[in-house]
Amino acid sequence: MKAVGVVVEYNPFHNGHAYHLEQAKKVAQADIVIAVMSGTFLQRGEPAMVDKWTRTKMALSGGVDIVIELPYVFSTAPATDFAKGAIFLLSAIGCDSFAFGSEDGSIKPFMNTFQLINNHRTEYDNLIKESLKTGVSYPKSLHYAYEQLSQKFPATYIDLAQPNNILGFHYIEAAMTLGSNIKPLTIPRIAAGYHDPLQEGASIASATGIRKALASTSELQSVHDVLPKASFDNLADWYGKNHNFASWETFWPFLQFTLIRHTPSELPRYAEVTEGIENALIKAAKTSHSFSSFMEKIKSKRYTWTRLQRMLTHIYTGFTKEQLHSFDAPSYIRLLGMSTKGQAFLGKYKKDITLPLVSRVAATDDVMLAIDIHVAEVYNSSIEQGTKMLSLPRDYQTPPIRF
Amino acid sequence: MKAVGVVVEYNPFHNGHAYHLEQAKKVAQADIVIAVMSGTFLQRGEPAMVDKWTRTKMALSGGVDIVIELPYVFSTAPATDFAKGAIFLLSAIGCDSFAFGSEDGSIKPFMNTFQLINNHRTEYDNLIKESLKTGVSYPKSLHYAYEQLSQKFPATYIDLAQPNNILGFHYIEAAMTLGSNIKPLTIPRIAAGYHDPLQEGASIASATGIRKALASTSELQSVHDVLPKASFDNLADWYGKNHNFASWETFWPFLQFTLIRHTPSELPRYAEVTEGIENALIKAAKTSHSFSSFMEKIKSKRYTWTRLQRMLTHIYTGFTKEQLHSFDAPSYIRLLGMSTKGQAFLGKYKKDITLPLVSRVAATDDVMLAIDIHVAEVYNSSIEQGTKMLSLPRDYQTPPIRF
């Protein structure tokens, strides 16, 4: 049995994801697909719109055979570490290959870009530093360094201004750095751009577009055409129970309270919170009625929106720099769900899996896993406050979903 | 000009308080009354039902001439420190005497009790320890030690089972320990017991009874007869703007979130949180829909309700053991409001006041005052979340109220 891996957030699972899965299996000539999925908080530093169990159901219905969780430590990390954690897990569970969607669509330019940067690392780093000194943001400095380098050594490279190309680059970097045999594959993304709004009559939309549509209308029907039926039903089910989708806007009362509850000197202990921003965060919290008005007040050239959201995520969950720096690679594989074929795969190759496979977490003393459980409680509590009831399954009590 | 001091919470100011003020002036033959009032969180470890400015207005309308704030560090402390902070401030601002309501009503038995305990301190402390070892609560152990001691040295003592007698005892203890010339006076409490519910047709009710009546009915009219008109109008005005009175029930979503956001090992750093209770607090928070159901789960013989509430107050505001232990006595007098007569008093005796008199706090580097400002922001934020608007005056921007 051959397995292809995918790195996903499924926030929510839509037709584009279904297409990607189909293509991944075809291109990889794989029997099953294994998805490593972020649990509660995502790479752009925001809460998942529905919990990990609902998204696992969507994934299994949509064609994934095994869903495993990318631990919080990696799911909320900058692209390099995010990719490292994800590829490490796909490799550990026994995938022959992994497939990612990209604007570029062919793997060779990715390899060229990786070689270019890898072979000229010092020069690249110096170019970044040089640019950072002039006060431009980190992503823009990366772009500058990359431009300079690729002009110096001409070849076919990927366009690193495209968000999915950046992630793809980091996946390949991770695979190469890990020294794993896992084979990178890429599939061209179809139709919708990352931030594009929904198009009338289209069956493909970006997850961002879908979330925006749902935030601006309470009418779930507006996203009906761009979701597989099972995804739509799962979202509708969630909405029926919780009357809302999780977002920074719905979590805002607690974020605001948490920021105000802290004195400035306490904030820089949290992961990614740079010394110097603490007063601005607290001051803005005291005078803002919503997350968006808060963000308007704190956004700056120095930090990307994503970086700011990641800081806020870590303040929200109480995740410290000390905790962040105590981890290097995932220490377990948390199984969130599997199909019959997925189960067969695990039965057959279990002994080859290089990490403990965790399906129930009642009694764990793994520190990284304890963080996932903690963060899930914080996430659940934020959602349940809106509904004034305790309705979500306690994360640690939930067995993998079988499909 | 002679000033008599009173130690108050005015939560809310009612007819019994008005009576007490009248009596205090009479007994002390004083020209003005100075009240030292708790700001946001009170001695029983709960938020004040309305903010300090509204309660200051009630106090001034009710006959107080100067309202000063008892800093958070003392307003939320056990009786000994609460009394110490309050009497220290009344003495510092120049009161000749202070008057407290008591079940006993005459000062001699208070003095006898103070002498009894003070002269046999070691024996008293040993009796307490002895009782604590058998597993009974601290208040009950105090009671046991006191009983033993007073039987050994018969005289007329106060009944220390009465809550106002206990406070009175600590006021006298504070005055004696401070070596201040301030003269203690007591006034018999009239009618309503501490926890008594409202009586049909009565004009006197306890503050607890009034709060309970308001919690069980949204009908403000139900407390009309037991409040002076100005108090009633101030409460009505607050309710009109904020649609609620502050309580642990209205603050519960944030308390719950804050408890769940912490890992157990982090909780014992907060003031009064004893090592060993942290798991119970977090576990109960995860499974409770309201503050009352939460308290049902954590109450125990070992801790009084008040003690538990004080722990929760400090967790809520982020006030640590380290902060608590860095203070001995108030370092400033925060002026919340004054009448014309109060202003005349301050004009006349300002130079004799032994602490800095703070009326605007825009630029303070006093650490204790910074805590008051911080706590007021936490308190305001909790109330404003309910109304989804920022409407309360920022504490540090608010000048004293002139009446």
Image (spheres, coloured by chain):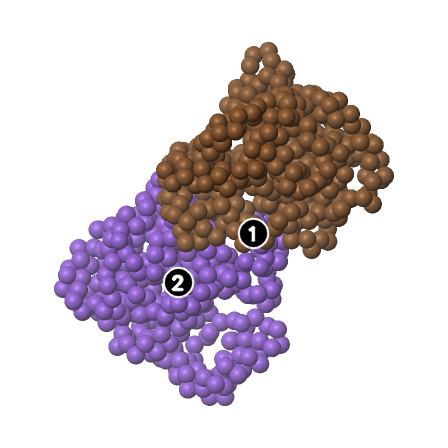
Chain colours: A brown, B purple
In the image, is residue A198 above or below residue B334?
above
Residue ranking furthest to the top: A201
- Residue A305 image point, x, y percent: 46, 34
Q: In the rendered image of this protein, does residue A221 appear above or below residue B147?
A: above
Quadrant position of residue A118: top right
Residue labelled with disc 2: B73
Is residue A308 in view? Answer: no
Give the residue drawn at x 30%, y 65%. Answer: B331
Residue depicted at 73% across the width and 53% down the height? A363
Tell me the residue that label 1 is attached to: A325
The chain letter under disc 2 is B
Give the image location of residue A282, x and y in percent. 40, 45
Percent across and percent down for residue A306 are 49, 35
* Residue A300 horizontal side relative to residue B274, left or right: left
Q: Secondary structure at mark 1?
A: helix
Mark 1 Cα shell of 10 Å, populated few (<14), some (14-19), many (≥20): few
Q: Report the chain holding disc 1.
A: A
Q: Amino acid at mark 2?
A: Val
Q: Crowding at label 2, few (<14), some or many (≥20) Cα neighbours within 10 Å?
A: many
In the image shown, does A319 or B158 lie closer to the viewer? A319
Nearer to the camera, B7 or A328: A328
Indicate whether B131 appears above or below A163: below
Seen from the viewer's position, the closer of residues B92 and A194 is: A194
**Label placed on residue A197:** none
Q: Position of residue B320 (x, y in %)?
A: 46, 61
Q: Amino acid at mark 1?
A: His
Q: Quadrant of residue B107?
A: bottom left
Q: Secondary structure at mark 2?
A: helix
Determine whether, in the image, residue B22 is placed left or right of residue B166.
left
Q: Left or right: where does residue A96 sit relative to residue B331?
A: right
